[in-house]
Structure formats: structure tokens, C-alpha cells
């Protein structure tokens, strides 16, 4: 009787030891056969850049000024008119007054030349003036070359036999110039130059203000 009881106890103890051994094997194998199991831990995303020590806002952000943007707002044809009236110099700055009454200054290279080159400037989808008015002097160009300053100087001698040596700038008289006739009197439309369509007012930012503009900031109550 005692032998049978001992066999039963021994069997139960052996079974329990087997279960402990089995669960241990399963746990260790699930952890990559290591005793430090962290596979169930939540994944933490980290950046390769260490966290920087925060600095004071006054040291990190430069002081901004309301007058930092000092471009002038003006219609494109008025800008060309100011340049022509000022003597249409290739290198010297020319003065003009923008739409807000600010005194401004521009140059041919920075503010005028691209007006004859840029696409979609005078109306949406428009090709640049030099696409037709170039050195090839095709029939459509009317003998007018706008690709360079020097070509403009000689433009009206080819475009108008009665120009008597004057350039397309009308000798500095904007309203009598060939440019004024094309850009203002005739107007610009997708089909070409038409006297039946008024000129498009193209407003752009150009030049820079020559005097500081006083900005008054009213505190909000």
C-alpha cells in the first residue's frame, strides 16, 4: 500500500517538475533564449539627433522689422514709363513713385528687362515679348528686337522708317514712345496687339523704397 502511494506521489511530483521545465523552456525560447525578456515591451521611436538644450527665445529669433520688405507696388507699364521718362539708362538707377505714394528706385537689369522676357506677365498664358520680338526679326516681330538694351535702342529705326533715328523710347517722351503705343494705347490681348481692347494693368513688386516708411502699430484694447 505504501509502495503504491509513493509511486502516485512520485508521479505527481515528476509531472509538476515536467510542467515547470516545459514552461521554462517555452519562456526562454520566446525571449530568444535569454533571461532578459523585453520583446513584449512597447517600441519607442528615437531620432538619431540628441535632444538639444532649449535656448531663450530672444536669443534664437532675430528681431523683425516691419520695414524689412521694402519692395514697391506699381503697374508694369507705369514702371516702364518712369524708366523711359528718367532717361532709360541701362546702368543708372531711376526714381519712381509707387501706388502707395512711396518714393522708390529701380534699375533696368533688375526691374525692367524681365518685363519683356517673362511668360504670363501681361495676361495669363502670355508668352514673353522676346518670343516674337527678337533678333530673328520675323514678320510677326514688326522689326522690333527687345532681347537686349542695345537692340531696343535701334528698334524704331527698323520698325518705323519715319522714326528719323529715334529709338522706341521716344527720346524720353513716354507718351510719344513706341512702347507706350504698344503697351498702353493698343493694349495686349492673347491674339496680339489690338486697339479695341484696353491695356491690362499688371501690378507687380519692383525696385525698393528709398525712404523708410513709418509704421504705426495701434495696440489692441
Image: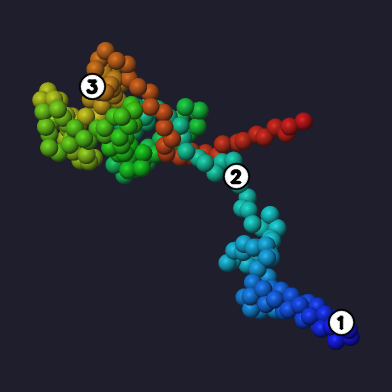
Residue displayed at 33% across by 26% down: 123
Residue displayed at 62% across by 64% down: 46
Tell me the quarter of the picture where residue 96 sits: top left
Mark before the other along the chain sequence, 2 or 1: 1
Q: Tell me where residue 87 appears, x and y as whole percent.
A: 30, 34
Assign a secondary structure to mark 2: loop
Q: Tell me where residue 182 appears, x and y as whole percent.
A: 25, 23
Mark linked to residue 65: 2
Task: Give the number of the mark in front: 3 or 2.
Answer: 3
Task: Give the number of the mark in front: 3 or 1.
Answer: 1
Mark before the other along the chain sequence, 3 or 2: 2
Given residues 6 and 76, the one toward you in this image is: 6
Task: Give the number of the mark in front: 2 or 1.
Answer: 1
Real-space Cα separation, disc 3 to disc 2, in angstroms:
45 Å
Given residues 160 and 114, the one toward you in this image is: 114
- Quick one: label 3, few (<14), some, or many (20+) residues within 10 Å? few
Mark linked to residue 178: none
- Reading the image, the residue beneath label 3 is 191
Mark before the other along the chain sequence, 3 or 1: 1
Mark linked to residue 5: 1
Query: Could you tell whether 98 is left or right of 58 in the image?
Result: left
Residues at circles 2 and 1 in contact by the CB criterion of under 8 Å: no
Assign a secondary structure to mark 1: helix
Examine the rendering and report whether any part of residue 172 can be seen.
Answer: no
Residue displayed at 32% across by 16% down: 198
- Quick one: label 2, few (<14), some, or many (20+) residues within 10 Å? few
Query: Could you tell whether 54 is left or right of 210 in the image?
Result: right
Given residues 39 and 184, the one toward you in this image is: 39
If the image is split into quadrants, where does the C terminus sit? top right
Amino acid at each position: 500500500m505504501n509502495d503504491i502511494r509513493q509511486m502516485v506521489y512520485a508521479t505527481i511530483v515528476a509531472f509538476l517538475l515536467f510542467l515547470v521545465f516545459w514552461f521554462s523552456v517555452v519562456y526562454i525560447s520566446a525571449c530568444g533564449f535569454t533571461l532578459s525578456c523585453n520583446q513584449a515591451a512597447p517600441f519607442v521611436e528615437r531620432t538619431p539627433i540628441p535632444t538639444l538644450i532649449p535656448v531663450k527665445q530672444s536669443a534664437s529669433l532675430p528681431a523683425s522689422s516691419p520695414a524689412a520688405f521694402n519692395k514697391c507696388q506699381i503697374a508694369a507699364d507705369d514702371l516702364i514709363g518712369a524708366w523711359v521718362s528718367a532717361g532709360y539708362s541701362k546702368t543708372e538707377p531711376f526714381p519712381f513713385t509707387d501706388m502707395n505714394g512711396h518714393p522708390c528706385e529701380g534699375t533696368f537689369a533688375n526691374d525692367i528687362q524681365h518685363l519683356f522676357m517673362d511668360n504670363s506677365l501681361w495676361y495669363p498664358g502670355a508668352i514673353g515679348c522676346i518670343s516674337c520680338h527678337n533678333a530673328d526679326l520675323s514678320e510677326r516681330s514688326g522689326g522690333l528686337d527687345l532681347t537686349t538694351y542695345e537692340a531696343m535702342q535701334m528698334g524704331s529705326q527698323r520698325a518705323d522708317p519715319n522714326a528719323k533715328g529715334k529709338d522706341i523710347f521716344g527720346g524720353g517722351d513716354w507718351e510719344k514712345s513706341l512702347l507706350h503705343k504698344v503697351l498702353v494705347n493698343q493694349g495686349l490681348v492673347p491674339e496680339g496687339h489690338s486697339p479695341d481692347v484696353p491695356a491690362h494693368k499688371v501690378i507687380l513688386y519692383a525696385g525698393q523704397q528709398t525712404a523708410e516708411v513709418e509704421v504705426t502699430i495701434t495696440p489692441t484694447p
